[in-house]
Image (cartoon, helix red, strand yellow):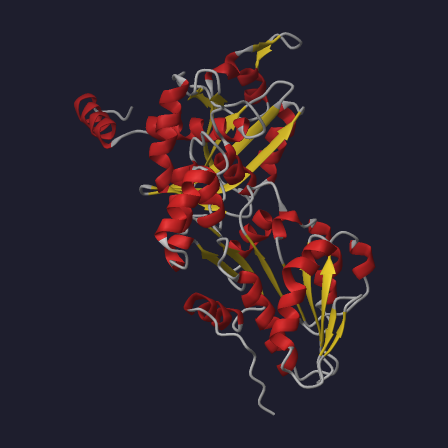
């Protein structure tokens, strides 16, 4: 039997259908009015009609029951209405197809009510509003028996939510599809309407909703533009430790606060950030033990000037305590904050990050920002001190450390001294 669904995909929707056919898991970051819900529901309908297994089960999941009904239910009936023998259950928001397949609209409000079902495919809409527990504990196991697929769709809503987390996983896992469709790429909405929307919404909100920008809603972002650029250039990836290169560490040491450690290697002009560690309210022995537990061969350990502060309880500086524990720190020069930030911006395009081990560092650098002074109508010079500060301070120190490494000029000078004095200095 030939069944024609009343749906003609746009070119970018057709491209997306083709990509989804090749991937079991996908994260779709699409601008508003892309038509992602229509696209994904038609993909579910096609999968339901063509699945060869007995009694296939598919689901569309929204954050709330009201959203599921208002966003998707009318579309389900519209696109399946011409299928002979189709039945609808308005109470359960369920569509039963003549081949035994079923598409059910579910909500994440009461995740426990979904537990125990099996699924051949599921789509999670407005993923930023969904509790990760729904996926990790309920939907993912439901797909295991029949190796079903799952597609996460939405538009960025900052970084502190499940949509950002699952997107980062998709970027790292090459078997997943990480698809981004900004309006500047699709050109679905005419420019006059976009200009009007930008004027009313403001630049940051516009970038978030229409350009799929994860950090646009963070005003005063210090590194945001550079992070976005290097992400597009695939600088966030799976980065294995290279045993042929020595590892350096750089520390931001807190007292009664967080301590951050960046592990990096250098290969020519490239900086490979392979690991990151952060903890709080722990003494130096804890962090030294972390360093020694890792299977890295170290070169230098860098710390800021305040490591020379004396611990009153011990009568020794932190540097002396670290030396007794087996870590000999190189002290970085004290530079003005803005000079350090400038150095960090200069070094950032040369950096590659292991997306798994350095996720907290990357998130912190996205978030690091200056607060806006409403009264003065300007941003503060000093970035806000929050959870992102320690990681970004460590990165700033790393930039200073790399600037302090011997240059070719210094190396030539050392060779010249050795020739004149017949000894190696």
* Residue shown at the point (46%, 16%) measured from the top left: 305
Task: Decide: is 411 above or below 106.
Answer: above
- In the image: residue 127, left or right of residue 340: right
- The front one of 139 and 17 is 17
- In the image: residue 203, left or right of residue 152: left
- The front one of 166 and 269 is 166
Residue 180 rendering spot, x and y as whole percentages? 46, 56
Residue 397 rendering spot, x and y as whole percentages? 44, 26
Task: Decide: is 28 above or below 317.
Answer: below
* Residue shown at the point (82%, 65%) measured from the top left: 116
- In the image: residue 358, left or right of residue 131: left
The single residue placed furthest to the bottom in the displayed view is 1
- Quadrant for the C terminus in the image: top left
Q: Does the rendering let one see residue 149?
A: no
Q: Does the rendering let one see residue 290?
A: yes
Residue 304 rendering spot, x and y as whole percentages? 47, 20
Residue 223 rendering spot, x and y as whole percentages? 42, 34
- Quadrant for the N terminus in the image: bottom right
How many numbered discs sit on the rendered protein?
A: 0
* Residue shown at the point (78%, 55%) measured from the top left: 111
* Residue shown at the point (27%, 30%) measured from the top left: 407
- The front one of 363 and 97 is 97
């Amino acid at each position: 039997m030939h069944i024609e669904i009343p749906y003609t995909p746009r070119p970018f929707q057709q491209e997306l259908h083709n990509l989804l056919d090749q991937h079991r898991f996908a994260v779709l970051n699409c601008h508003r009015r892309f038509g992602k819900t229509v696209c994904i529901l038609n993909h579910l309908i096609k999968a339901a009609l063509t699945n060869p297994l007995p009694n296939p089960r598919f689901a569309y999941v929204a954050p709330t029951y009201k959203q599921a009904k208002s966003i998707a239910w009318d579309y389900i009936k519209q696109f399946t209405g011409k299928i002979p023998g189709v039945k609808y259950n308005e109470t359960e928001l369920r569509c039963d197809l003549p081949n035994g397949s079923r598409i059910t609209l579910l909500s994440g409000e009461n995740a426990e009510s979904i537990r125990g079902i099996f699924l051949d495919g599921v789509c999670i809409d407005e993923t930023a509003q969904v509790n990760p527990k729904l996926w990790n504990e309920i939907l993912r196991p439901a797909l295991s028996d029949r190796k079903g697929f799952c597609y996460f769709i939405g538009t960025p809503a900052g970084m502190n939510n499940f949509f950002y987390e699952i997107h980062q996983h998709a970027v790292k896992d090459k078997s997943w599809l990480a698809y981004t469709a900004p309006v500047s790429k699709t050109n679905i909405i005419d420019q006059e309407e976009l200009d009007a929307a930008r004027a009313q919404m403001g630049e940051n909100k516009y970038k978030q909703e229409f350009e799929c920008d994860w950090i646009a809603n963070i005003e005063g972002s210090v590194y945001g533009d550079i992070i976005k650029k290097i992400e597009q250039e695939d600088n966030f990836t799976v980065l294995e430790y290279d045993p042929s290169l020595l590892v350096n560490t750089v520390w931001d040491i807190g007292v009664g606060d967080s301590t951050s450690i960046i592990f990096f290697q250098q290969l020519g002009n490239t900086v490979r950030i392979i690991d990151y560690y952060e903890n709080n309210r722990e003494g130096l022995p804890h962090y030294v033990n972390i360093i020694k537990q890792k299977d890295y061969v170290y070169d230098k350990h860098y710390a800021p000037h305040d490591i020379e502060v004396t611990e009153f309880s011990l009568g020794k500086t932190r540097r002396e305590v670290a030396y007794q524990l087996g870590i000999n720190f190189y002290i970085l020069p004290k530079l003005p904050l803005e000079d350090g930030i400038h150095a960090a911006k200069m070094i950032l395009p040369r950096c590659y990050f292991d997306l798994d081990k350095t996720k907290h560092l990357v998130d912190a650098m996205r978030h690091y920002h200056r607060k806006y002074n409403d009264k003065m109508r300007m941003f503060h010079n000093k970035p806000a001190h929050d959870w992102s500060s320690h990681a970004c301070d460590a990165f700033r120190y790393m930039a200073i450390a790399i600037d302090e490494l011997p240059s070719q000029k210094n190396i030539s000078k050392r060779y010249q001294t050795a020739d004149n004095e017949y000894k190696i200095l």
